Image: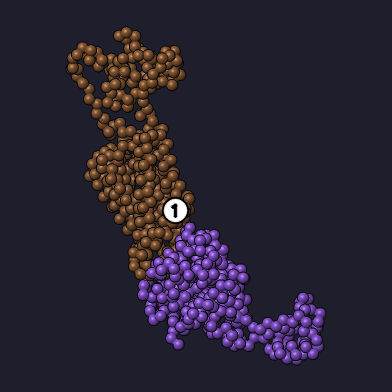
Amino acid sequence: MSAFASFKSLSRAMFLGFKRDGGALFFTILFPLMFLVIFGGVFGNQSTAKVTVVQVGQVSVLQQALAHDSGELSEVMEVTRSGDRAAALGKVEKGDADAAVEQRDGRLIVHFSMADQVKAGTVRGLMNALVQSANQAAAGKPPAYTLEAQQVEDESLDAIQFFTPSLLGWALASAGVFGASQTLVSWRTKGILRRLQLSPAPIPTVFAARIAVSLAVALVQFGLFVLVAQLPFFGLRLGHAWWMAIPTVLAGVLAFLSIGMVVGAWAKSQETAQAATQIIVLPMAFLGGSFFPLDAMPRWMEVVSYVFPLRYLNEAMLNVMGRGLGPMSALPQIGILLGVAVVGALIAARLFRWDVT
Amino acid sequence: MAQAIQVKDLRKRYGDVRAVDGVTFDVEEGEFFGILGPNGAGKTTTLEIIEGLRRPDGGGVSVLGMAPWPRNDRLLPRIGVQLQASSFFERLTAREQLRTFGSLYGVPAGKADAMLGTVGLGDKADVRVEKLSGGQAQRLSIACALVHDPEVVFLDEPTAALDPQARRNLWDILRGINTEGRTIVLTTHYMDEAEALCDRVAIMDEGRVLRLGAPAVLVRGLEAPARISVPSGVLTAEEARRLPGADEAGDDGVSLTIISRDPSAVVAAMAAEDALDGVQIRGATLEDVFLDLTGREFRA
Ligand SMILES: Nc1ncnc2c1ncn2[C@@H]1O[C@H](COP(=O)(O)OP(=O)(O)O)[C@@H](O)[C@H]1O
Ligand SMILES: [Mg+2]
């Protein structure tokens, strides 16, 4: 018999076992996705919502600007038309629209409410800019100064750009540590390890099969996260080197499996393993930058974050997926994660027991 | 006949407990061999050392001419093991379970499926292992031990915790496996099971083999008296004691019991007095052997 045949059938058995485990499916796949939807929805909409403007009657300044717009204007402003001035003003009062504009002779009149000061400011600024450029066009002179706006990705990273990689990091970490520790403890307490010891299948094959299943599940998690985050509602824009996230994910999974193996080799019962997993994963998720950016943390927390492997997984995925940096930007972190995997595996091998007693 | 297993002066201790304390026996090829003893006697430890799961502190084991320790992957395909606790992969069906174990030995799926029929689980193929009854789980566990056609099969208390019906059912399966020519080593704490199945038994207690031989020989060697009982009221104890061949008699209000080393004489005399209605005759059993050897009642 070949080791590969054993590997294949063991992987299959473990994958079926995972697929039929409702709890595991929920916690590794659905639960993190729910977080993505909530975080992406709550924080994402703030920065991306457009200013809504009601145009009352003919407003040539606005109409011309929209006619020549190459997309920038419609990205920040949504214009509807209305013939009824009173109704338009009513909408602004109620907050259904951010502003109403009308033109009387040479005057552009903007009605706005101060209920949302940010939007009020945006509308005034926009309208002012439109009037300025209309004036220049009327005078026939090219503008002396133009403003070129360039976003600095790091500073104004959209919420979804941050949350996609970092919540994914948390999901991978908990699936890895939890999966490996539970498997090892349950195989030992249920006697499967001893049963496998009695079969001629090489023991490394058994572990390789378990690792392969975890890697496959992680790729599914990755794919789902990226697909959901790219829906128009969330609007994730992947960096050009996003593919580098795949080896990063795999290295991260190896690191967390290895930590899970240490827990599983040490813990005597599944309850102990579960508690230990929580104690490891939750603080790591908070301090490793899964729920809020490391830059926003107090200095001491940022220093502490360096001890958590999750920090490196998050950082590397954020670099290539969210920040749009090059492929090399994930390499140092991948190296660290693989190092953690090796050290963890060595410790787990030392603690390993075939048997409950 | 050749020896399938040779065990010589095996020893294993856990702290102060001498779990196995100098066990010696041989098992012949094709034999149905039993290790009988109460809980804690050292049966599982002995079996696990022979299987190669544990390393003995002292003594030697050879299975099919090979040493089982350290893990010997030339020997492993030739032995089949059912552990005391059934060990299954979680959330797989009976068929998937058996195919997975089969594949570890290079057994094709079709052959694994056929094994389900052998243990009478053909109609449970698609049932998850968690949903199987105790008896069904034991049979699946035995199927997993047999899937690769091993020459020697080890079964650790395969019928523990089964109802009588399921036990008999399993006995038939085990006899069938033995008839195919496989050597079987079985542990049990049921006297009747050892008597019903085994060619030879080793009676174990406190890590030692107390007696070894065919169940019938062990019982006969005991020369234990038979017990003849009839419902109370047919004869008085006084009358019974005077029957030819009777050694002792007593009445507990429910039945009258006569103890005799010559039961045929007693029964003949009772027949003459027309006192045989509802008679029961019980010969000595392994239970009496155990009592005789240890001075204790056998407690499972
Ligand atoms: N792993 C172990 N650690 C410590 N003591 C053990 C261990 N396994 C068995 N024992 C002890 O060894 C003795 C024999 O146990 P075991 O072989 O399981 O008996 P049996 O199978 O006949 O019930 C018992 O006293 C038991 O408590
Ligand atoms: Mg036992």
The correct choice, above or below, for B290 with respect to A228 in the image is below
Q: Residue at x 44, y 75 (%)?
A: B150
Q: Quadrant of the C terminus of chain A?
A: bottom left
Percent across and percent down for residue B75 are 38, 75
Percent across and percent down for residue B66 are 38, 79
Residue A286, quarter of picture:
top left
- Is A273 in front, or is B250? A273
Q: Which chain is purple?
A: B
Is there any visible trace of residue B168 in the rendered image? yes
Colour displayed for chain A in the image of the structure: brown
* Disc 1 residue crowd, few under 14, some 14–19, many 20+, Cα 10 Å: some
In the visual, does B300 lie left or right of A133? right
Amino acid found under the numbered disc labelled 1: Lys
Q: Quadrant of the N terminus of chain A?
A: bottom left
Q: Residue at x 44, y 74 (%)?
A: B149
Q: How is the image coloured?
A: by chain
Determine which residue is flagged by label 1: A19
In the visual, does B219 lie left or right of A171? right
* The residue positioned farthest toward the top in the image shown: A105
Percent across and percent down for residue B252 are 76, 77
- Is B268 in front, or is A125? A125
Cβ at disc 1 under 8 Å from ligand 1: no
- Is B148 in front, or is A115? B148
